[in-house]
């Protein structure tokens, strides 16, 4: 695994959570497009990755 | 080492569990998302940093164990053989083949041979110190720094190229080519050395390439091939007809 891949995989949960919360907060303003659902999807993905990464490494 | 990785894993669990708890409290409307979101993202960022450190250490350790094998093979070929009849080190040629008499005066040649043998001892000490360094680094893998690995790789390139140039090629240049080509034992020693060194060179360059692909900024130099082959040189030389001026 290259150093760039290592950085990207490790940073992905934090990035997904940040993006998710921004979308949820934007969605809560209730104007224009509703981003709430997409926001929670990103939050869920971030949490799943946090669980999956160590398990995947251990399995490898 | 195992304790160190274990503590990292536990650290990751302790960073992940509060995130779930805070998210649950947000869903149940006990806490506002404006308070919990920054905390969750910060915890996730620390989690990511721990994960990255763990992966980097694991990769460094893997590279270090590959390097140890490489160094051991180099040592077995050049330094760790007995001094008996089975000794196939390239430096042994200095004992079994006389120096070139045309190239220099015998007294200069007799001074050059101990010089190469002394230099060989320097390389031997260098090798053992490098091997001990690798073993110490393997033991303290928890605090292994990228810089140590870069320094070690650069040191190895310098060591390998220096050995090939000063000891192997230096010995071959000094010895009588005719005597060298004539001796079956010398040929055996040289073939063994050249074959193993060529295989070792291939593996070393693959290892250096891998280090670079992992993001270690080591010098752009590769380990060099052996430039001298007296047997190939003698077969390439076409026999010159003897000219008579009489």
Image (tube, rainbow, N blue to C red):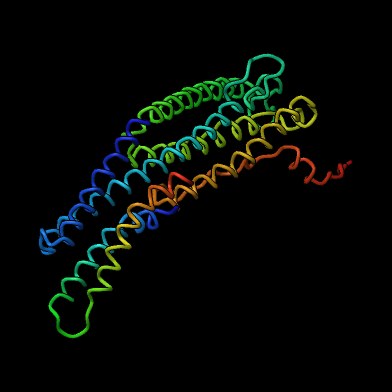
Which residue shows up at 76% across the image and 38% down it? B231
Q: Quadrant of the C terminus of chain B?
A: top right
How far across and how far down the image is residue B200, in percent?
60, 38
Which residue shows up at 80% across the image and 43% down it? B235
How far across and how far down the image is residue B133, in percent?
40, 27
Q: Quadrant of the N terminus of chain B?
A: top left
Q: Count the marks: how many?
A: 0
How far across and how far down the image is residue A37, in percent?
26, 73
Q: Which quadrant of the figure has residue B170?
A: top right
Which of A14 and A39 lies nearest the eye of the viewer? Answer: A39
Which residue shows up at 47% across the image and 46% down it? A59
Does residue B37 appear anywhere in the picture? Answer: no
Which residue shows up at 37% across the image and 41% down it? B57
Which of A34 and B47 lies nearest the eye of the viewer? Answer: A34
Residue furthest front as drawn: B28
Which of B236 and B80 lies nearest the eye of the viewer? Answer: B80
Residue furthest bottom as drawn: A32
Q: For this view, does B239 lie left or right of residue A10? A: right
How far across and how far down the image is residue B119, in percent?
51, 25
């Amino acid at each position: 695994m290259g150093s760039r891949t290592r950085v990207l995989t490790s940073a992905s949960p934090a990035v997904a959570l940040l993006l998710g919360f921004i979308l949820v907060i934007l969605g809560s303003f209730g104007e224009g497009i509703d981003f709430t659902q997409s926001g929670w999807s990103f939050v869920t993905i971030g949490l799943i990755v946090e669980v999956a990464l160590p398990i995947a490494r251990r399995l490898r | 080492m195992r304790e160190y990785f274990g503590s990292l894993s536990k650290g990751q669990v302790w960073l992940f569990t509060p995130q779930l708890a805070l998210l649950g409290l947000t869903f149940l409307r006990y806490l506002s998302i404006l308070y919990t979101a920054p905390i969750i993202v910060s915890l996730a960022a620390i989690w990511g940093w721990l994960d990255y450190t763990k992966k980097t250490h694991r990769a460094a350790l893997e590279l270090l164990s590959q390097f140890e094998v490489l160094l051991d093979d180099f040592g077995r070929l050049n330094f760790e053989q007995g001094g008996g009849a089975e000794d196939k080190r390239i430096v042994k040629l200095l004992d079994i083949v006389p120096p070139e008499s045309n190239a220099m005066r015998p007294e200069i040649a007799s001074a050059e041979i101990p010089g190469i043998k002394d230099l060989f001892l320097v390389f031997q000490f260098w090798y053992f110190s490098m091997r001990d360094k690798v073993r110490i680094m393997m033991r303290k893998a928890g605090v292994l720094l990228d810089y140590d690995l870069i320094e070690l790789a650069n040191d190895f390139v310098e060591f390998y190229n220096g050995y090939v140039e000063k000891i192997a090629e230096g010995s071959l240049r000094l010895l009588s080519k005719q005597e060298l080509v004539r001796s079956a034992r010398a040929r055996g020693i040289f073939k063994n050395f050249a074959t193993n060194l060529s295989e070792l060179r291939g593996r070393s360059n693959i290892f250096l390439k891998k280090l670079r692909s992992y993001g270690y900024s080591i010098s752009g130099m590769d380990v060099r091939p052996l430039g001298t082959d007296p047997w190939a040189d003698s077969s390439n030389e076409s026999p010159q007809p003897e000219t008579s001026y009489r």
